[in-house]
Every structure is written in C-alpha cells, then in structure tokens.
C-alpha cells in the first residue's frame, strides 16, 4: 500500500490507531483514495496536507461520522471500521472539530458532564435515572480538567459566553473527560490568538507526557513542526510522505504537494 | 435560573397553596371549568416541553397521543360497560396505549430532523384523525360518549380539577427532575448539536425516543381526563390540530425548554382564550386576537417570558457573566499558498 509509514511493524500488529487503504468518494470526488496511516502509541502525530487533501474526511471516517467505501480502521488491533460515533468514542477515540462544536446553551460544567457518562458507569449497579447529572466524582474530574485548561472560573457560565479560543479549550477538556486512548484534534490552533496557541500546545504536550496519544490536523506549520514527533502528509487522499518533522521539512514530495503551490501561483490569497 | 433558591421554592409553595384552595374559594362552575381546562393544557404543554423543549424536535403531532388517550378511555368504557367514577381506572390504560403508539411513531419520525420532523409529525397526526373519522371502533364522525357521572353539579368540576392539578404538578416536577438529570442533559445536548452528542457517547435515538414516550404517556393521560370531563370525543376534537399549536404556543410564550415555561404559557393563554371567547362571543375573532398576540410575543419576546425576565434581572444586577478573554471569532488558520493551490476545500 502506498504511503505506509510509522516505522517497521510486524504483520498483524500495528500502532494504536491504524487505517488500511481507506477510500471515500463524495459523488465523483475521491476524497480519500487508499489512505493508510499508523499512529504509534504515545506519539503526537501530525497530519498535514493542502486543503481538500482529505484530512477532515479521514477524521470523519475514523470517528464514524462518514461511512467509508473501502479499507479498514483499527484501534489497538480491534477492527472499528464504520462503527457509529458513540461507539468509537466509547472505545477510546476522542475528537475535536475544525469549527468548535460545544453545547452553547449548556453551562461549561454541563458540557463536561455530557461527555462523562462512560467514565462513571459501574456495571451491575442500577442507577436512579432521575438522579442529578454528574456525581461528586464526575464533577471533581470535570473541574480538574477545566482547571487544567484554565476554564475553572467559567464552570457555571453558559458555554455561549466563551470566546473562540476558550471554546477550543473546552472542547479539548470535555474530550479528555472520558479518558480516551487517543485524541484527534482538527485544527486546534485555527483562529486562535498566538498566546492561546502556545497555551494549547503546552496542554497537549502535558497530556502527551502523561501518556496520551494525539493525531493532529493543523495548518499552522510552526505549531505542527514544534509539537509533533511524526508527521504524515496527505495529498489527493493518500499519504505521500511520512516521518519525523526534520525529514518532512526537506522531503521533495512534500514541497511539491504542499508548498509547491507558492511557485505555481503566489498572487492569490 | 436566576432566582435565589429560597425565593424560588417559596413561590412554588405559594403557587401550590393557591392552586389547592382555588376551587374552594372560586366556586362558580364557569370559573372552575376554565380552571380545569387550563390545568389540562398546563399538563399537556409541560409534557410536550419534556420532549420538544428539551430535545429541540418540535412535534406538531402530540395530539395523536391526546386523542389516543381519549379514544382508548371511550372505547374501553363502552366495551367493558364501565360506568360512573370507575372510568378513572382507565387512565393508566390510556397512558399505556399512548406509549405503545409512541414507539413506532418515534422510531420513524425521529430518523429525520428539523422541518422534516415537523412535517412527519403533522402527517402522522392526520393519519390518526382520518382513522378516527373512518374506523368502526371509534364511532366515526358521531364519536364516543363517556360514562355518566351522577355527581352534584355544584361541585362536579372539583374532582377533575384536582386530577388535572395532580397531572400538571406531577409532570412539571418530572420535567424539573429530567432537566437536571443526566438524561435531561443528553436531551439538551441533542438540541444544541446532535452529531456532536453522538460523538461524545450519547445514544441519541434511545434518548430521543424515551423523551418522546414520556411526553406521550402524559398526553394520553390528559386526553382521557379531558374526554371524561367534556363527556364526548369527536374526531376533530380528539385529534385537534389546534391542540398541537396551543401547547407549542404555550411553551414558546413561557419559555421553550424551561421547566416553568409551558405552565406559565398555559396559565396565560388558556384563560385568555376562554375569556375572549366569552366576552366577544365569536370564537374566530378571539382566535385571531390570540394569533395577533402571539405575533407580538414573537416580535418582542422571541425567547419567551421566563428567559426575557431572567435577562432583565441579570442586567439589573449588573453581573452579566461575560468571558473576559476575546480572540478573533473567525478561523484564520489557512495559509495563502494552500488557498491558492486548491481553492476552497
């Protein structure tokens, strides 16, 4: 398969998150054409590529928002191809969206509690269905995470009062509530002011140091090169290059696919 | 909820006390009859709000459950020759039939969203109205009469008043419990962004269907009680499109998705409608006036009375919780080179 990357792996093994030959077409447009990636556990992996190269589609296919036409998706060796979003989340893949998607009419704390339902489930115990949402443990964990992203002071505020950057942080926090094995971030730095970008990068590094795996789509090159241990480059729905940031920066295929545009026509914005 | 807890629970207790003694103070049959109608609508609107208000799926087909409750009570009383106050034992059956109808109705309608959902609920509603007109069991356009209650006319309305009060208060209490529960949180998350809620592990179909069934059960109860009260059900009143519009308007007026919203809306709209009908004598004119009133509400109180008042209180206290850190609201992560190469993605 073209674009196999992520180092040598024994047959049948693989990384924490693996896609094999994933294809997805929208009408006549082939968004993904046999895309194979392999995310090593404990890594921060970057996924870059020009607009329309299939990055967000790949996220959607992995997390069950789009059905794929061909190929397979594995999480830790388990096949999760075409699993619905709630199942993908329960299995341990959290994700954020390019344009943040929070529950704007709920409070910040309520946003956290929506995601916390799996973490507190105790098998064999019947729960009072009308009990107040979020037990003490759930609320404490939610509060700790809000504190971690710097939003603890906003816990009781309606989420719609948060700024764009704060919404990104809230989305990161509530994805973390369920303790996912891997987190997919779609443009975490997009539209965020520089100081907050550093803040977000620091939070991601901290979570990664604690063992969390990340797969990040991002256009901000400084951000990607600075934070990622491995980078995959997507073009026309396939992986054209993969490796550590230094190698990617020099790879001629990457320059052609990703940066070559500047030489073709650099007069438009 | 911006009221301090002591004040809030104090006003709830005062309201309950007033409601409890109301028919003992105002003994006029006309007044208690309007009060019963109002409480029936309060229960119906509160039930509608548990589903539509919290989930954001605006149903205009809840009269299906109301009519099903009325007809279930009517047909069962007729077939089993139930007479007198024993008819009230049929209330649970009416609720159960409404729940059974809600399952396939919900499984079909809840697959689509927004406007399509509204249209599907209206279509299902008309199917049921047509069936009521045409099936033998419903008595067609002649309808069904309720068993005769040989009660003293002076206090005839009182048992209905208290039953309707129990249903309305019980439904509102249930609505309050649901709103603060995990289930209610999931419903409100679905209203804000259903796909996002799925991605956070919410089993959206199960949650929506459960809320749909809960509100159907109360609608069935209320429909049966209404049938016993007015003693007759005809297809056009059992399955009445105006009922759907009324409960929706009540919830919108008071505050969609708020616990007290639909109750407040019912307390204003139903007596208002009855008052206008009585004093103008022409029910069409009163409906036109109410329609105009509704347009004014939409223009000046688009979110309903309760959210409006809350905003005023918050503004008056001068502590609007605004987030201090503001950054540009538009994503600007795209680099010119990429944009130039591919255009928009």
Image (cartoon, coloured by chain):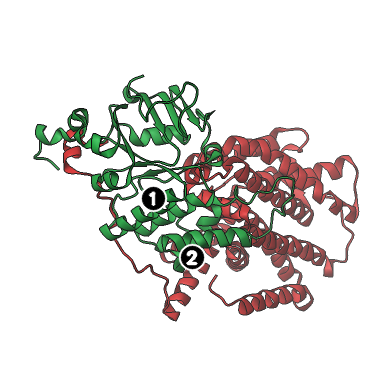
Q: In which quarter of the image is residue A253?
A: top left
The answer to whether residue B144 is seen in the rendering is: no
Q: The green chain is which one?
A: A
Number of other residues with Cα within 10 Å of mark 2, as a class: few under 14, some 14 to 19, many 20 or more: some
Which residue is pictured at 57% across the width and 38% down the height?
B109
- Residue picked out by circle 1: A100
Residue at (35% x, 28% y) in the render: A5
- Residue hosting label 2: A155
The residue at 56%/41% (across/down) is A90
- Estimate the x, y position of residue B302 in percent, counting from the top left: 44, 62
Residue A81: x, y in percent?
Answer: 50, 28
Q: What element carries label 2?
A: loop
Please give the letter of the chain rendered in red. B
Residue B55 location in percent, x, y?
55, 50
Res B59 label? none
Assign a secondary structure to mark 1.
Answer: loop
Quadrant location, the C terminus of chain A: top left
Say whether disc 2 or disc 1 marks the residue closer to the N-terminus: 1
Q: How far apart are marks 2 and 1 (CA)?
A: 18 Å
Q: Is residue A149 left or right of residue B227?
A: left
């Amino acid at each position: 398969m073209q674009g196999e990357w992520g180092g040598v792996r024994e047959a049948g093994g693989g990384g924490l998150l693996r896609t094999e030959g994933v294809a997805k077409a929208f009408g006549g447009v082939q968004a993904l054409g046999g895309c194979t990636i392999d995310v090593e556990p404990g890594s921060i992996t970057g996924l870059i590529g020009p607009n329309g190269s299939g990055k967000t589609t790949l996220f959607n296919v992995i997390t069950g928002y789009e059905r794929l036409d061909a190929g397979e998706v594995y999480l830790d060796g388990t096949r999760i191809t075409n699993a619905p979003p709630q199942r993908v989340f329960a299995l341990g893949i959290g994700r954020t969206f390019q344009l943040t998607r929070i529950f704007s009419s709920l409070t910040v704390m309520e946003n956290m509690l929506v995601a916390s339902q799996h973490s507190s489930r105790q098998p064999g115990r019947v729960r009072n269905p009308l009990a107040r949402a979020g037990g003490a443990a759930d609320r404490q964990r939610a509060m700790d995470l809000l504190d971690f992203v710097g939003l603890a002071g906003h816990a009781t505020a309606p989420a719609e009062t948060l700024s764009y950057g704060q919404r990104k942080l809230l989305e990161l926090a509530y994805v973390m509530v369920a303790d996912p094995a891997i987190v997919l971030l779609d443009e975490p730095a997009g539209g965020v002011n520089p100081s907050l970008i550093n803040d977000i990068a620091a939070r991601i590094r901290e979570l990664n140091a604690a063992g969390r795996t990340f797969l990040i789509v991002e256009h901000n090159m400084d951000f990607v090169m600075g934070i990622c241990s491995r980078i995959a480059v997507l073009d026309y729905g396939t992986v054209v290059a993969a490796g550590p940031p230094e190698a990617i920066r020099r790879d001629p295929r990457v320059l052609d696919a990703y940066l070559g545009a500047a030489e073709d026509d650099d007069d438009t914005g | 909820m911006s009221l301090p807890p002591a004040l809030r629970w104090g006003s709830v207790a005062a309201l309950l006390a007033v409601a409890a003694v109301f028919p003992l103070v105002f003994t006029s049959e006309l007044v208690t009859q309007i009060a019963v109608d109002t409480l029936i609508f309060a229960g119906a609107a509160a039930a509608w709000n548990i589903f539509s208000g919290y989930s954001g799926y605006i149903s205009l087909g809840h009269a299906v459950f109301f009519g099903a409750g009325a007809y279930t009570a009517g047909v069962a009383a007729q077939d089993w020759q139930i007479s007198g106050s024993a008819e009230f034992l049929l209330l649970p059956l009416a609720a159960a039939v409404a729940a059974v109808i809600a399952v396939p109705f919900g499984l079909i309608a809840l697959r689509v969203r927004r406007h399509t959902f509204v249209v599907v609920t209206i279509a299902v509603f008309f199917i049921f109205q047509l069936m009521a007109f045409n099936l033998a069991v419903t008595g067609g356009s002649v309808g069904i009469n309720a068993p005769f209650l040989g009660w003293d006319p002076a206090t005839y309305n009182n048992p209905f008043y208290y039953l309707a009060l129990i249903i309305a208060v019980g439904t509102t209490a249930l609505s309050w419990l649901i709103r603060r529960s995990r289930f209610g949180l999931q419903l409100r998350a679905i209203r804000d962004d259903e796909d996002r809620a799925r991605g956070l592990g919410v089993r959206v179909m199960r949650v929506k269907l459960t809320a749909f069934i809960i509100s159907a059960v109360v609608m069935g109860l209320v429909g049966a009680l209404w049938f016993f009260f007015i003693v007759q059900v005809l297809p056009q009143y059992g399955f009445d499109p105006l009922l759907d519009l009324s409960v929706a308007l009540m919830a919108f007026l008071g505050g969609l998705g708020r616990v007290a919203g639909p109750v407040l809306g019912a307390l204003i709209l139903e007596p208002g409608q009855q008052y206008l009908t009585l004093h103008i004598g022409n029910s069409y004119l009163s409906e036109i006036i109410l329609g105009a009133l509704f347009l004014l509400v939409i223009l000046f109180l688009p979110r309903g009375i309760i959210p409006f008042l809350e905003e005023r209180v918050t503004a008056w206290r001068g502590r609007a919780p605004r987030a201090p850190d503001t950054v540009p609201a538009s994503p600007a992560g795209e680099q010119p080179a990429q944009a130039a190469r591919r255009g928009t993605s």
